[in-house]
């Protein structure tokens, strides 16, 4: 007579003797490994961001203390404003990390239109009360708080380009049906930024959008063709503004007219060369005493090289290389194509900006105003960088084993 199992084993299938029995103690390591795999990218992003901001704040204080004193302000004036901006940015990153990144696909068009309206207001005649001209340019919008819409346009372009690239995934190889629709939207945004004028931001916006499309499958030959067609336009823009032509001349020969057109890059190279291997020491920079223009902003990397030497250069390069590696890994593990392209764009927003800043300081690129993310003074650029980190963290969390199983 067949016995009927009762009690605790009731209703369970008999164990297969061919299958090994796994105890809870043996299962624990794999569960711990899964949890660690779910969170290490976000922890790495938090660590890299904290190191970058802390080191940048320290150097920014050193670079700006003399400038603040010369303006009759406390030596910590700019550093304190940067600290407040960093705390605001950290809160923004935490909030965005909790927002499902897929929402950016739905918000891409409204966000881009909103940024477009702001850019129009910035350059519109008669709006000087809220869009004042500062140092010959109208880049800031003052609506109770002052900010640069062109900085936030970078995030808007990346999100919108990623969203449309998913929709047109099977047509990106075509020039007329794939790439041209993107140009129809990019060009008005770029023209508004050029009108400010802010050529460096305009070119960076195009570059970030192009990198997202290239990652999405667009042909590199199309970008080369469009680049060649754009050369005459860029040359006309350079010739139309005398200072741009002078900057190109200084880039081609940094030793020519070191008291005039080559002054900025010449002083930057002096600062970098003075640092040697280990630097002159924190706070001991001599170039910040009125020799190096914008030492707390456009040429902060030169200040770091002077005070920390080759070791400081290696540290900063390694830091942003880490952003590149972690960001691309998040992109590779993204749950969907939109997450992949959005992560690529946000990673490039941080890393490309950093390497362009370093290239300018080292005279590898023409002098232009590109902030060093998390480090250079400027709250608009700072908030943009923190927002990019928050979006990357959201994608990383959605890529974990728990979310994949769900």
Image (spheres, rainbow, N blue to C red):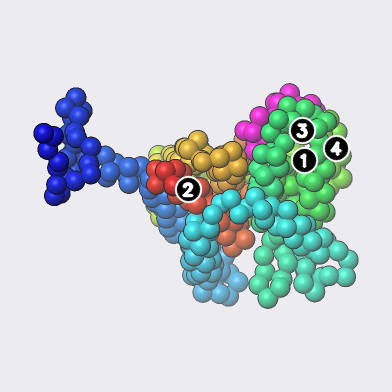
Q: Position of residue 106 (x, y in %)?
A: 66, 53
Residue beneath disc 4:
233
Q: Position of residue 348 (x, y in %)?
A: 58, 42
State the separation of the CA atoms marked 4 and 1.
19 Å
For the residue pair 258 and 42, the one nearer the viewer reads as 42
Q: Nearer the viewer, mark 2 or mark 1?
A: 2
- In the rendering, which numbered label is found on residue 182? 1
Cβ–Cβ under 8 Å for marks 4 and 1: no
Residue beneath disc 3:
178
Q: Tag 3, which secondary structure?
A: helix
Asked if residue 218 lies in the magenta stretch, the reply is yes
Q: Position of residue 81 (x, y in %)?
A: 54, 69
Q: Residues within 10 Å of mark 3 (few under 14, many from 20)?
A: many
Q: Which portion, as a residue range, is magenta?
A: 211-228
Q: Which quadrant is the N terminus positioned in?
A: top left
Residue beneath disc 2:
398
| Residue appearing at x 28%, y 43% in the figure | 31
Cβ–Cβ under 8 Å for marks 3 and 1: no
Left or right of 59, for residue 144: right
């Amino acid at each position: 007579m067949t016995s009927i199992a009762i009690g605790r084993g009731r209703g369970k299938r008999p164990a297969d003797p061919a299958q090994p029995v796994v105890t809870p103690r043996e299962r624990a390591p794999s569960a711990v490994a899964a949890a660690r795999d779910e969170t290490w990218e976000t922890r790495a992003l938090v660590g890299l961001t904290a190191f970058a901001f802390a080191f940048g704040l320290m150097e920014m204080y050193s670079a700006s203390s003399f400038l603040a004193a010369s303006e009759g302000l406390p030596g910590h004036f700019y550093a304190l404003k940067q600290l407040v901006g960093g705390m605001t940015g950290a809160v923004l990153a935490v909030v965005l990390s909790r927002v499902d990144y897929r929402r950016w696909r739905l918000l891409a068009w409204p966000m881009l239109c909103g940024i477009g309206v702001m850019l129009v207001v910035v350059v519109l005649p008669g709006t000087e009360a809220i869009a004042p001209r500062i140092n010959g340019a109208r880049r800031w919008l003052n609506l109770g708080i002052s900010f640069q819409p062109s900085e936030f346009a970078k995030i808007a372009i990346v999100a919108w380009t990623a969203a449309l690239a998913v929709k047109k995934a099977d047509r990106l190889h075509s020039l007329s049906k794939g790439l041209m629709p993107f140009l129809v939207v990019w060009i008005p945004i770029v023209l508004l930024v050029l009108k400010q004028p802010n050529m460096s931001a305009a070119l960076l916006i195009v570059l970030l959008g192009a990198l997202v499309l290239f990652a999405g499958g667009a042909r590199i030959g199309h970008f080369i063709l469009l680049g060649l067609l754009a050369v005459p336009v860029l040359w006309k823009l350079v010739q139309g503004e005398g200072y741009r032509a002078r900057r190109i001349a200084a880039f081609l020969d940094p030793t020519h007219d070191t008291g005039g057109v080559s002054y900025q890059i010449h002083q930057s190279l002096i600062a970098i060369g003075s640092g040697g291997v280990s630097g002159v020491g924190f706070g001991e920079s001599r170039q910040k005493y009125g020799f190096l223009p914008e030492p707390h902003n456009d040429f902060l990397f030169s200040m770091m090289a002077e005070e920390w030497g080759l070791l400081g250069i290696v540290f900063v390069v390694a830091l942003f290389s880490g952003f590149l590696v972690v960001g691309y890994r998040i992109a590779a593990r993204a749950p969907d194509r939109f997450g992949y392209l959005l992560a690529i764009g946000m990673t490039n927003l941080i890393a490309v900006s950093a390497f362009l800043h370093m290239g300018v300081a080292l005279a590898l690129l023409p002098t232009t105003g590109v902030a060093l993310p998390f480090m250079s003074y400027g709250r608009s650029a700072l908030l943009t960088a923190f927002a990019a980190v928050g979006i990357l963290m959201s994608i990383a969390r959605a890529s974990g084993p728990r979310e994949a199983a769900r």
